Image: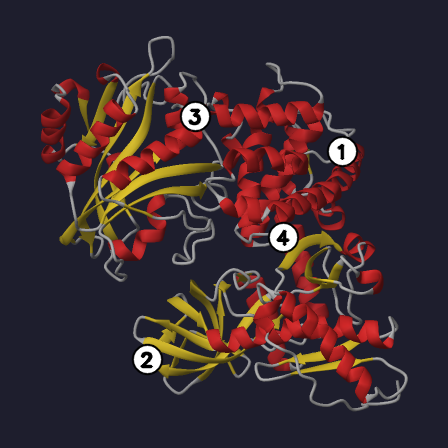
């Protein structure tokens, strides 16, 4: 019963029997909390239920929530592999009461599960409570029979939980186990509390207050419960091992790495194996939830996690990319509990393989250049910031890797010099861009982009999200607020709205917040990755920094998806009927129609058009799934994906495939395979039947 998968199901089954709704884990990209980089606790998806903004059809819930702590405020990245319990990816088991039961029942439920369900010895357990929480202390005495010395009162914020500066908050009670004198450490509140002997494994939060202002705190009308148990910690306790990395799940992942490398861990290199196993989990789950490696925001944190693991693979002597080879082992271990891993296996594998192939080239080149640049330096010296920046800017060698590689030789890096070099380069780019003949109104986007960074696009996964207004622009100038009647351009940190590109029109919809609403009539992409929502304030006043809800017009987006997918089928059918010389020269994907521009040397006959229409509809009727993969441009084109004339592609591209060919060379092979960043239907049947209404010649050719 002590395997990770058994513990998860025992926990959820217990709470199901106790009248709790079992709710699926929410994605790692929080849709309802723009202040968080990644979901890092079970309560994140219930945040609006606790504050009363959202009603659910149940008042008790239980979840196994996938969580990531890397980047942002909660960042465990640099500790992973070197301590017994730090992980970037972990599972949080929790039970929640929304104004239903409170302290007494929460303590009783926890006590029965750990002593009867998991069979922990009562004399090894102890708890902490907030120093003024006499109520919780009394319930622990009554329910668990604890004496005063096993109920430790803690006066610090460790035992008082708050959602933020304002909002729900309350005291909490943590459950610890004493793992024995052979491990160093003291009980909570003692000078030796940082040791590993006393391990905290379950935190019960009693939400009973609302922090209205810094000074004022009032009672919540319906006190609630939020608890969190670390699944991996519980597994280490029940399996009798000192480190989470010695539990069954991690053993299997480390075994997979050992067999791929042809050697197992030893005292010197065990940290590298642990980093690889942990980072494999966080990378794979993030990709499965729609995050892809990039140089901005969440994608940049993912890239850092991936590359840290890949550097450790290289330290272990890996001659070929390693991470992608371990994905089947992870899917075997966790795919049943998290089916998104099974669905995303191909995308995860290809993303890891592509990233590691590129990174190995970067690493070899970068380490060579670094060793040339530092051959005269000795321990205690500092590498100048200019050289570190050149490595980053010209060769794609990140600063943290330069630091990591030099740490072994006790050489530091001049961070201030690095930052200066980066600022200088931005100033030059600005000057160059301002002189490139763009309209004056457009130059504003460059400074906005520099201040806010690129917008995080969530629209492949969802049509609604929450965000923070980062900039408002009117008549080519940034403004602090806009009121009813104003035409305004809005930039938000993350958005589900698609910005016009690749022929597909930008999304429309509503952006709203407390006391205001903006009707969005178009979304455009500006200045390298900035999504600009163009609209009119229809109610109230919006200010920069405001929290907003973004909702895409679902019906219009559905029509755009269908029409965009239809262009792919028509493109392929035209090539089959008229010949492979046919190339797309442009398109318009609107909600009510689509237009497709091609190169062809003579008029198209009515029979040919009818045949194109028939072939496209053959694929529609198949109702086969539309799949997306991430690849390098060269690999994608080598596999036969069509790249479009005049489109600029990054190093990595989305490859969209649909349908199975029925005739000729295409028989039983993917029908349409194109490089495309647009939004598409899930299955070809969702397109609906295709009808060609007219054709006309635009110009010769």
Determine whether the residue tagged by mark 3 lies in a helix, strand or loop: loop
Q: Residue at x 55, y 48 (%)?
A: 288
CA gap, disc 2 to disc 4?
37 Å
Q: Residues within 10 Å of mark 4 (few under 14, many from 20)?
A: some
Q: Nearer the viewer, mark 1 or mark 3?
A: 3
Residue that carries the numbered disc 2 in the rendered image: 540
Vertical comparison of 203 with 690: above or below: above
Q: Residue at x 54, y 51 (%)?
A: 298
Q: Which mark is residue 320?
A: 1
Q: Residues within 10 Å of mark 2 (few under 14, many from 20)?
A: some
N-terminal label among 2 and 3: 3
Please say if the residues under marks 1 and 3 sit with CB atoms less than 8 Å apart: no
Distance of mark 4 from mark 1, alpha carbons? 22 Å
Q: Looking at the image, is mark 4 or mark 1 earlier in the sequence?
A: 4
Residue tagged by mark 4?
Answer: 294
Measured from the top left, where is residue 544 in percent x and y? 41, 69
Q: Which residue has dot 3 on it? A: 3
């Amino acid at each position: 019963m002590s395997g990770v998968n058994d513990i998860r199901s025992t926990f959820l089954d217990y709470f199901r029997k106790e009248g709790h709704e079992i709710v699926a884990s929410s994605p790692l990209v929080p849709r309802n909390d723009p202040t968080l980089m990644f979901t890092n606790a079970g309560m994140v998806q219930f945040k609006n239920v606790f504050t009363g903004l959202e009603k659910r059809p149940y008042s008790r819930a239980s979840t196994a929530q996938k969580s990531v702590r890397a980047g942002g405020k909660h960042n465990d990245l640099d500790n992973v592999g070197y301590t017994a319990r730090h992980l970037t990816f972990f599972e949080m088991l929790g039970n929640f009461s929304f104004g239903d039961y409170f302290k007494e029942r929460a303590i009783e439920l926890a006590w029965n599960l750990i002593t009867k369900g998991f069979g922990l010895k009562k004399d090894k357990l102890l708890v902490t409570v907030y120093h003024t929480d006499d109520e919780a202390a009394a319930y622990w005495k009554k329910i668990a029979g604890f004496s005063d010395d096993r109920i430790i009162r803690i006066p610090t914020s460790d035992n008082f939980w708050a959602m933020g500066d304002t909002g729900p908050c309350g005291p909490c009670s943590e459950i610890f186990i004493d793992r024995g004198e052979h491990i160093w450490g003291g009980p909570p509140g003692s000078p030796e509390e940082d040791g590993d002997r006393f391990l905290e494994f379950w935190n019960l939060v009693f939400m009973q207050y609302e922090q209205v202002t810094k000074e004022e705190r009032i009672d919540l009308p319906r006190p609630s419960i939020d608890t969190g148990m670390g699944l991996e910690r519980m597994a280490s306790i029940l399996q009798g091992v000192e480190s989470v990395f010695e539990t069954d799940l991690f053993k299997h992942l480390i075994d997979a790495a050992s067999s791929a490398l042809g050697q197992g861990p030893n005292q010197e290199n065990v940290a590298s194996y642990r980093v690889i196993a942990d980072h494999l989990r966080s990378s794979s789950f993030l990709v499965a939830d729609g995050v892809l490696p990039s140089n901005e925001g969440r994608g940049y944190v993912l890239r850092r996690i991936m590359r840290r693991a890949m550097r450790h693979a290289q330290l272990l002597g890996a001659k070929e990319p390693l991470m992608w080879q371990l994905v089947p082992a992870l899917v075997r271990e966790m795919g049943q509990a998290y089916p998104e891993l099974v669905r995303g296996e191909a995308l995860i594998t290809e993303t890891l393989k592509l990233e590691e192939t590129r990174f190995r080239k970067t690493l070899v080149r970068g380490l060579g250049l670094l060793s040339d640049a530092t051959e005269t330096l000795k321990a205690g010296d500092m590498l100048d910031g200019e050289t570190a920046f050149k490595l980053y800017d010209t060769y794609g060698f990140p600063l943290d890797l330069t630091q990591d590689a030099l740490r072994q030789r006790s050489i530091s890096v001049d961070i201030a010099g690095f930052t200066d070099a980066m600022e200088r380069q931005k100033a030059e780019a600005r000057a160059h861009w301002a002189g490139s003949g763009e309209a004056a109104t457009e130059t504003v986007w460059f400074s906005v982009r520099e201040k806010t960074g690129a917008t995080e696009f969530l629209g492949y996964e969802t049509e609604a999200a929450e965000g923070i207004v980062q900039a408002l622009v009117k008549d080519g100038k940034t403004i602090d607020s806009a009121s009813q009647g104003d035409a305004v351009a809005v930039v938000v940190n993350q958005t589900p709205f698609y910005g016009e590109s690749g022929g597909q029109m930008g999304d429309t919809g509503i952006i709203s917040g407390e006391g205001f609403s903006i009707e969005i009539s178009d979304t455009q992409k500006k200045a390298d990755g900035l999504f600009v929502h163009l609209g009119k304030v229809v109610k109230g006043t919006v200010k920069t920094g405001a929290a907003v809800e973004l909702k895409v017009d679902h019906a219009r987006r559905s029509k755009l998806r269908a029409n965009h997918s239809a262009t792919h089928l028509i493109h392929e059918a035209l090539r089959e009927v008229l010949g492979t010389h046919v190339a797309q020269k442009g398109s318009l994907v609107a909600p009510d129609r689509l237009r497709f521009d091609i190169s062809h040397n003579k008029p198209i006959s009515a029979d040919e058009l009818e045949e194109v229409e028939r072939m496209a509809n053959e694929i529609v009727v198949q109702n086969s799934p539309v799949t997306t993969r991430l690849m390098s441009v060269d690999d994608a084109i080598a596999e036969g994906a069509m790249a479009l004339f005049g489109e600029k592609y990054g190093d990595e591209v989305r490859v969209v495939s649909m349908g199975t060919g029925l005739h000729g060379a295409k028989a039983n092979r993917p029908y349409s395979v194109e490089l495309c960043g647009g939004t598409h239907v899930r299955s070809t049947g969702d397109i609906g039947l295709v009808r060609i209404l007219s054709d006309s010649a635009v110009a010769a050719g």
